[in-house]
Amino acid sequence: MNKQPIACPNPSCENHLPRSADFFRKRGYYTPKHLGHKLARYQCKTCGKTFSNQTFSDDFRQHRQDINHMLPRLLCSGVTMRRAAWILECSYNTVCSRLPWLAEKARAAHEAALDSGAMKTSYIQFDEMQSFEHAAAKALTIALAVRAKTGQILSAKVGRIPSNGHLADTGQTLYGWTRNESPKACLLALRQASRVAKPKVTVGCDKATPYPSYVAKAFSKRLAPVVDAQAARGGAGGDFDPLFKLNHKCAVIRSDLACMARRTWATTKKRARLQDRLDLFIAVHNGYAFT
Ligand SMILES: [Zn+2]
């Protein structure tokens, strides 16, 4: 669909700010390789600059704009980046470069949703889940906050943590993996979640000792959040799970993000990209129209 342009893209042209409707003349058509239909080109009558509606679009200069709709859905359906490239008939490098771009748009959509007031809640569930970057000894934590009533994900923040158990020595000596970013990730996630908290809010979490202090720090005193520290689910399956909504979302993340599955070879290579994938997952899962 060709819309009438309202300004010249040349910043030094007098038509750069919208003025008269007839500042341009039509200058034929072109058909982008992967778009499947033609687009009109225009020319500024003052400076002679030629342009199209694509010039003003946020996917300007992308060769494969057509993958922007399907790529987030594939990446949040358990498909790996290489397999997504194969399905969409583009290169792996295109998927690599498009992921941060899509994640930026997903973050903006999530910020807008948090500010819209439509997600106001009086019960938030909070916990951490674990993954790793490159090698199992380089452990990562993901602080996750969920709106218990609807299951909408309010925040997911990645940070590195020292590995424990039999990998602790390897992480420390081989990789120097000793920094603990868990408090920082928890505070970031709780601060973001606190933006949709109603005046009377309860934060459900497990009995991990530092969580009540994180909640007190992250939530403004005016909200006076009540921390509901539950015993972690015990015993065989079928027992009542007080953090069911959150644990369910953790299971969905493990299933829908290829790099988060257990016993996978599609592991996270950079934690910044894991953060991108989680932000993309929040937007897809919460149902934002961001592409
Ligand atoms: Zn111009």
Image (cartoon, rainbow, N blue to C red):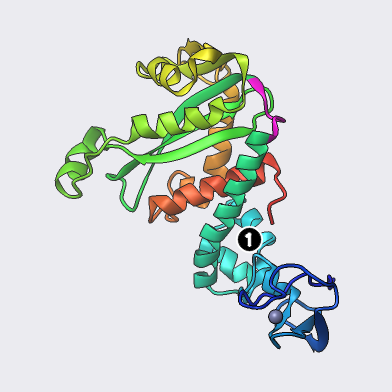
Which sits in the foreground, 32 or 48? 48
- Residue occupied by mark 1: 71
The residue lying at 85 percent from left, 78 percent from top is 22
Is residue 272 among what the camera can see? Answer: yes
Q: Quadrant of the C terminus?
A: bottom right
> Is 23 rendered above or below residue 114?
below
Q: Is residue 5 magenta?
A: no
Q: Position of residue 198 (x, y in %)?
A: 63, 18
Q: Is residue 120 magenta?
A: yes
Q: Is residue 37 above or below residue 59?
A: below
The percent coordinates of residue 63 (x first, y second) are: 62, 77
Please name the residue shown 55% across and 22% down the image.
125
Q: In screen coordinates, is 126 left or right of 65? A: left
Q: Nearer the viewer, residue 46 or 266?
A: 46
Q: Quadrant of ligand 1?
A: bottom right
Relative depth, front residue between 214 and 235: 214
* Residue 185, picture quadrant: top left
Q: Which residues are magenta?
A: 116-121
